Amino acid sequence: MGNLATNQKLDIFPTLTLKNDGQVGQSSYVHKKGKHSHIDDAKPKRKSESERLEIKYRTKKKLVNLLNAVGESKTAESMALCGARFDVLTCGQHIVAQTPNHRCNVRYCVLCANRRANKYQKKYLPFASAFLKFTVDELGRIVKRRTKITPCLLTLTQVKIKGEKLKDSRERVLSSFRNFIRHDFFDDYFDGGLFTVDNTTSDDGNHLHLHIVVFRKKFIDADLLKEEWAKVSEGAENLNIKRIEDVGTLEDGLRETIKYVSKPLDIENFEREHLLELLEIKGKRMIDTFGEFRKFCQIYKPEEKPEEEPKKEKQKLEEGNYCYHCNDDSVLFHVRMSAKQKIDFYRQIEARGSPPTQNQ
Ligand SMILES: [Zn+2]
Ligand SMILES: [Zn+2]
């Protein structure tokens, strides 16, 4: 089969449509799915990449309009440009890499969300891993731990107050939390941790909770912990604690907590007043450390590991190299695409079976 030559790149869309027809068996991926993949399509399944992207861009559009409506035209402008165009590295059948023209880094931008979560994950994972083995002594020195600590996931919710503003609700839950961790009993059982603030909006108003990775020194009964939380939170009854090792690795546990810094907005119900509430807490932290773990993060210097793997990957990610998804000798080349073109491209790839892709 003929590969798309570099000089054909401007014709990528018509060419892709042609390639879509009958020549798909060359992709290593498609071999696995075979030609019966349409049978799977009848079942309800998770959204495809193109569907997810469509929703994200619809959300972005709504946010841009709302931002303009409330006079935040600078933010609106930056968000409008965010992920509007891409430089895509492709063999014509797969997307191997993609670079957006612009990232707005607005906290509630749906296109920047994954990137934001990944940034925190990368930042805190080395500290959390090291904290299992080391700690800080009274003189501020990093020392080996003598006893085992158990990282746990803790969720704290608060009593709902109808009509309470996001800003007030956030301050209330954080103030309860500060009192909670200031208690002597807390230090007896825990060595600090990391938390994110999460909001679920319903008709009743805002409902904030804290998702926490907490390092447990000593077993504590959940009911006892619940009682202590109720004392400082005007009687909140919901508390959940579980060991991270029961749900996965430390990395999984951290991600489970950090994902709330980039939880997708419930855009169907997201209106002007919600945006105004978000703007009120602009610049406030959504993630923070506390207790011994906080001290540790300030002192400990993670080792810089030479990263072998990504380098190898990088060699492949150049124009003119072979596509590693293809079994044939398809060559990679760059194409400029608008967001809409990229979504169409995904849809074409998905029509041949869901693709291995490289996001952002
Ligand atoms: Zn963005
Ligand atoms: Zn390929």
Image: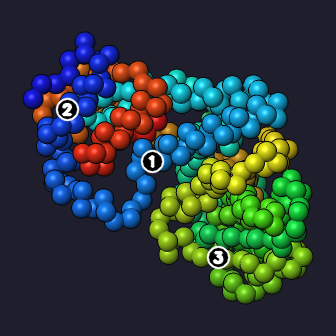
Question: Where residue 266 appears, x then y in whole percent?
Answer: 65, 54
Asked whether 76 or 248 is in front, the reply is 76
Tag 3 near tag 2, CB within 8 Å: no
Mark 2 sits on what residue? Answer: 19
Which x, y percent locates residue 209? 74, 65
Reading the image, the residue beneath label 1 is 51
Ligand 1 quadrant in view: top right
Mark toward the start of the polypeptide (1 vs 3): 1
Between marks 1 and 3 in the image, the one whose residue lies nearer the viewer: 1
Taking the image as shown, residue 168 lies to the left or right of residue 329, namely right
Residue 236 seen in this snapshot? yes
The residue that disc 3 covers is: 241
Whether residue 249 is situated above or below residue 305 in the rendered picture: below
Disc 3 from disc 2: Cα separation: 52 Å
| In the foreground, 138 or 115 | 115
Q: Specify the amino acid type for callout 1.
A: Glu
Q: Which structural element holds mark 1?
A: helix
Q: Residues within 10 Å of mark 1 (few under 14, many from 20)?
A: few
Q: Which kind of residue does numbered mark 3 sit on?
A: Ile
